[in-house]
Image: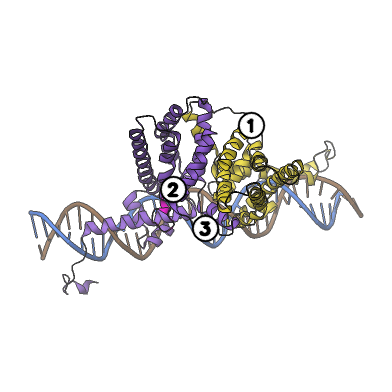
Chain colours: A purple, B yellow, C brown, D blue
Amino acid sequence: MPEDIDGQDTAEPLPLNEAEAVATRNLVFVAAERLFALHGFQGVSVRDITAEAGVNLASINYHFGSKDALLFDIFNRRTTELNRLRAKMLHEANSAHAGKPPVRAILHALIAPPVLWMDPKGERLVSVQFLIRARSEGTHQMRDVLRSDVSHLRRFSDALLAACPNLAPEEVYWRLHFSLGLVHNNRFAELDRLSTLSEGLTREYEIERLIARMVDFAEAGFLR
Amino acid sequence: MPEDIDGQDTAEPLPLNEAEAVATRNLVFVAAERLFALHGFQGVSVRDITAEAGVNLASINYHFGSKDALLFDIFNRRTTELNRLRAKMLHEANSAHAGKPPVRAILHALIAPPVLWMDPKGERLVSVQFLIRARSEGTHQMRDVLRSDVSHLRRFSDALLAACPNLAPEEVYWRLHFSLGLVHNNRFAELDRLSTLSEGLTREYEIERLIARMVDFAEAGFLR
DNA sequence: CTGTGGTCCAAACAAGCGTTCGAAACCGTC
DNA sequence: GACGGTTTCGAACGCTTGTTTGGACCACAG
């Protein structure tokens, strides 16, 4: 609109340039995480994301480089966040038990962080759903990170090996694998199916109670 | 080749028309199941499938109607197969225990069928990987089937409720959910990661031993 | 006022997708 | 040998995909 040039172009104080950029970036980030959590990686297009975020189509490539880079960015952020939380809880368990935490404390440090995010009313629910999806549907880049993620998991397997000296290492690894299965099975679709099966009995759950249930189950499997 | 008409056209007995059609159909079926198990539903194109099968691009639409219909066909076949196997084992457990099978027998009927397919050298390995993928990446049509699948699962939840009269029903449903998590977590990527973590200790497993391990773990979680 | 660097935007791009089409090829049967 | 029904084939269709482009817009500095 060239006729606006000599109008009141300094009338209202628009938000800063930089702040707007950050806003757009965040809008894209949040929308992408949500849509991916709901419909999967390949099931969401760049146009879906920008439409949900209310920004221009080119925003993703401008701010993140590519669709893959965007999702890798989300994945990296959430994975780091989760790993830090788990490491912190394992560290606390170590401190509380003089470096020899029992199985239950280790399993709690492993299970509690992601399940804490599963509050149905919380905004982190999509983050954990995103991570669960990324585990099976992610790009090659994500798989590589998950493989290096093994070094993070090793802290838990080492702790469990120390806590179960009378168990064959092979056995410990399998049971750790089973315990992780409890967490990874909590996709929206699975929880819905469980609600249907139980006729609503499991529809509303209290987070702390759910964590306790899961740790109970895993601990029993470990110590049986 | 019109010049062959008056040649020896009855020289070699070519395979029947019908048999060839079945062959093409099966080639597509097998290739699609394999590729989907490896790379996911949306990650495999019609051209990928037909190339792998060594057939013409149009074969999928001719024999199955559409890509969706093809994958639904595979899904339906494998799901039916698996459900039948589980139902049969549950029925046998019922017969062996006068209609009141213990928790362990019920869990075995639930877990053994899919894990029996997990023989690393067997051809059914891709089938179970396909089903695990379909659970989270499937089409809406597949989801609907999985929802109706609840009626099949209910036989198991009912049996477990009867076997655990002292447990709150809510608790039984959650533990059934956890037990299913053990099975669904056995994707290729997860097994690979476990092998890396255990430094090869879990790389080669014996099926019967793995089933016993999983049933042990789930049973302990149930009876704790 | 005039550049300057950063951001946004509408439009277009090439590539890949699932699907369709008409003709060719094939079979068993007349 | 010619016919009719089924299957295969190469080529094309229309559409969606992720990405790129060139210019408009804005706040700020010279």
Q: Nearer the viewer, residue A5 or A163?
A: A163
- x and y percent of residue B42 in the render? 54, 49
Which residue bears the numbered disc 3? Answer: A203
SS at badge 2: helix
Which residue bears the numbered disc 2? Answer: A115
- x and y percent of residue B67 in the render? 61, 52
What segment is highlighted magenta in the picture?
A119-129
**Sequence-earlier tag: 2 or 3:** 2
Q: Chain of mark 1?
A: B
3D distance between C-alphas at marks 1 and 2:
31 Å
SS at badge 3: loop
SS at badge 1: helix
- Are callouts 1 and 3 both on one chain? no
Q: Chain of mark 2?
A: A
Circles 1 and 3 in contact, beta carbons < 8 Å? no
Q: Which residue shows up at 35% across the image and 44% down it?
A: A81
Label drawn at residue B207 = 1
- Badge 3 amino acid: Arg
- Badge 2 amino acid: Val
Q: Counting other residues with Cα less than 10 Å from the Cα at mark 2, is it few (<14), some (14-19), or many (20 or more)?
A: some
Q: Chain of mark 3?
A: A
- Are callouts 1 and 2 both on one chain? no
Q: Which residue shows up at 39% across the image and 59% down it?
A: A50
- x and y percent of residue B37 in the render? 58, 42
- Badge 1 amino acid: Ile
